[in-house]
Image: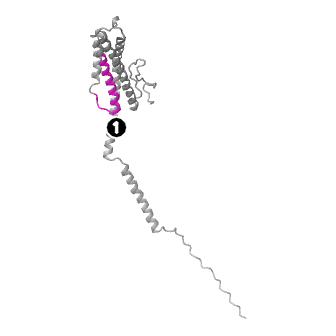
């Protein structure tokens, strides 16, 4: 008896394992990425080119910086001059006020030498403010106010001196005119001193109070309560 042949063993064929590669980006995505990168570079360059100051703007900035520095120096010099002028003219105004308030019939007029010294002091003060430098508008306004006040004080002294050669009602009329001129001069100085205080604060020097003594009821401006040198507005 013949044995049947064993069935052949079928072995599964081993499959080769290959690494799965990441999907390659399509050409459209590559093009889009390149376009985005180029756009960023171009727009960045445009922003830099637009915002970068050009030669004209750089020159203007330099001129503004020089002007600000020059103005700070002018303000400091003007403040020094104003203090010296105040100290020179305060005794003149005090003597003039007493002379104008005195009754000439009682011999209260000051000596002629005193009046001559007042005229010399005011003339020197007027000369100190002559030929002013050109500065920023606010500084020019402060200087003009102080200079105008100095001229008014000089005029008041001259008016009083002229009254001494008169008698009767004419003398009284001229002396009253000198009283008004003196009051106007102190008021004008107070306006200039207020402007000077403001430009000092703006320039970083702090408050600088250079005011003349004002009579009660004169309506002259007075110093603010801020401490000298304070930067508070």
Quadrant for residue 200, please give it.
Answer: top left
Q: Position of residue 156 (x, y in %)?
A: 31, 17
Furthest residue toward right:
1
Element type at mark 1: helix
Q: Position of residue 171 (x, y in %)?
A: 30, 11
Is 225 drawn above or below residue 69 in the view shown?
A: above
Pick the residue in front: 26 or 113: 113
Pick the residue in front: 90 or 182: 182
Q: Is residue 30 left or right of residue 18?
A: left
Residue 73 visible: no
What residue span does the magenta drawing correspond to?
A: 132-157
Residue 41 visible: yes
Q: Is residue 148 magenta?
A: yes
Quadrant (top left/top right/bottom left/bottom right) for the C terminus: top left
Furthest residue toward bottom:
1
Quadrant for residue 172, please give it.
Answer: top left
Pick the residue in front: 43 or 209: 209
Q: Main secondary structure of the magenta part?
A: helix
Quadrant for residue 230, please give it.
Answer: top left
Query: Residue visible at 39% across and 57% down?
Result: 42
Q: How is the image coloured?
A: one colour
Q: Position of residue 60 (x, y in %)?
A: 32, 42
Query: Residue visible at 34% across and 14% down?
Result: 96
Quadrant (top left/top right/bottom left/bottom right) for the N terminus: bottom right
Which residue is denoted by mark 1 in the rendering? 65
Q: Position of residue 198 (x, y in %)?
A: 40, 29
Q: Is residue 147 magenta?
A: yes
């Amino acid at each position: 008896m013949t044995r049947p042949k064993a069935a052949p063993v079928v072995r599964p064929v081993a499959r080769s394992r290959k690494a799965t590669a990441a999907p390659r980006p399509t050409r459209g995505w590559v093009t889009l990425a390149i376009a985005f990168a180029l756009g960023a570079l171009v727009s960045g360059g445009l922003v830099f080119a637009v915002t970068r100051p050009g030669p004209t703007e750089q020159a203007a900035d330099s001129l503004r910086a020089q002007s600000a520095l020059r103005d700070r120096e002018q303000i400091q010099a003007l403040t020094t001059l104003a203090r010296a002028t105040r100290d020179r003219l305060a005794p003149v105004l005090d003597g003039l006020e007493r002379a104008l308030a005195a009754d000439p019939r009682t011999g209260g007029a000051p000596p002629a030498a005193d009046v001559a010294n007042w005229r010399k002091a005011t003339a020197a003060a007027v000369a100190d403010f002559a030929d002013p430098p050109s500065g920023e508008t606010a500084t020019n306004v402060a200087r003009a106010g102080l200079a105008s006040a100095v001229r008014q004080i000089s005029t008041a002294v001259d008016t009083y001196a002229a009254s001494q050669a008169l008698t009767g009602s004419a003398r009284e009329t001229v002396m009253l005119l000198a009283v008004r001129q003196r009051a106007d001069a102190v008021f004008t100085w107070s306006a200039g001193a207020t402007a000077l205080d403001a430009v000092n604060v703006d320039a970083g020097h702090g408050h600088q109070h250079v005011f003349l003594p004002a009579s009660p009821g004169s309506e002259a401006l007075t110093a603010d309560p801020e401490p000298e040198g304070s930067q508070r507005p």
